Amino acid sequence: MKSHTLKKIAFILLMLVAAPSLFAHALWIETKATGTKGKAQEVNVYFGEFSENDITKADKWFSDLKDFTLVLVSPSKKETKLTTKALENKYQAFFTPDEDGVYTIVMHHTVKDVYGTMKLDYNSSANVVVGNKNTGNNIANNSNKIAVFSENADIAKKNTKINGVASYDGNIAKEAKIKVIAPNGWEKELWTNDKGEFSFTPIWSGNYMVEYAHTEKSGGDHNGKKYDEIWKMATYQIAVK
């Protein structure tokens, strides 16, 4: 058997082993749900397996994942690109609010390498309420193609229903599968209704992760490699008191 054929088989076997681990991981944003005008707000971006509290060190992120973009959208829809700094297990940024309303932080990255026959597209967002929620408190301020949002994330409490909405390609995501991961790793799958809405009632305090993944059957060429599908993931963390 020729060496190039052996290499090809080895690569396929490697992808079969690596794929489950890879797709168990996600990028997500952590920041406080409220902020104050004139005071610096800390924003952190993590990569890893949230349900297992497994955080990947910043210098171990695969491919060019570290080249993600992080954009701040003010309540009045002014966009500012945030500069991040690599720390041991995260990337960190800061911004100082100067408006009242809800700020939206948007993270996006399409991975340079094609994995198997799939192009990977990571998305995450977070919201920060400053003063009031009169402006900017909607999913439309998120520029990502795939997104999750909750208008009451800043007041999330144990044993109180949390309402959310999902969108895809600028439209509400009807009958979309949503995954909610509790602080202890417990997971629950939900489905949005015909208005793109979903809800759940947290029974523990702590950080919850809401994930919305969608595989688009679309082929093409990405950096010189063929792909048959585009895998898109959106994450949204909610801190429950």
Image (spheres, helix red, strand yellow):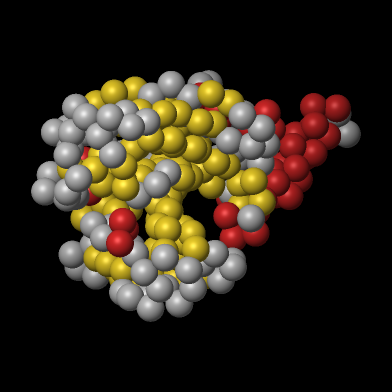
Total tally of numbered discs in the picture: 0
> Residue 43 in the image: x percent, y percent?
44, 36
Decide: is 171 above or below 90: below
Residue drawn where x is 54% and y is 31% of the image = 91
Q: Report whether 79 appears left or right of 237.
A: left
Decide: is 38 above or below 193: above
Whether residue 136 is visible here, answered yes or no, is no
> Residue 217 in the image: x percent, y percent?
40, 47
Residue drawn where x is 31% and y is 42% of the image = 35
Whether residue 52 is visible here, answered yes or no, is yes
Residue drawn where x is 51% and y is 67% of the image = 182
Q: Is 231 in front, or is 203? A: 203
Residue 64 sits in quarter: top right
Q: Report whether 233 appears left or right of 191.
A: right
> Residue 224 in the image: x percent, y percent?
53, 21
Q: Quadrant of the C terminus?
A: bottom left
> Residue 171 in the image: x percent, y percent?
20, 50
Q: Is 193 in front, or is 182? A: 182
Q: Is 24 in front, or is 228? A: 24
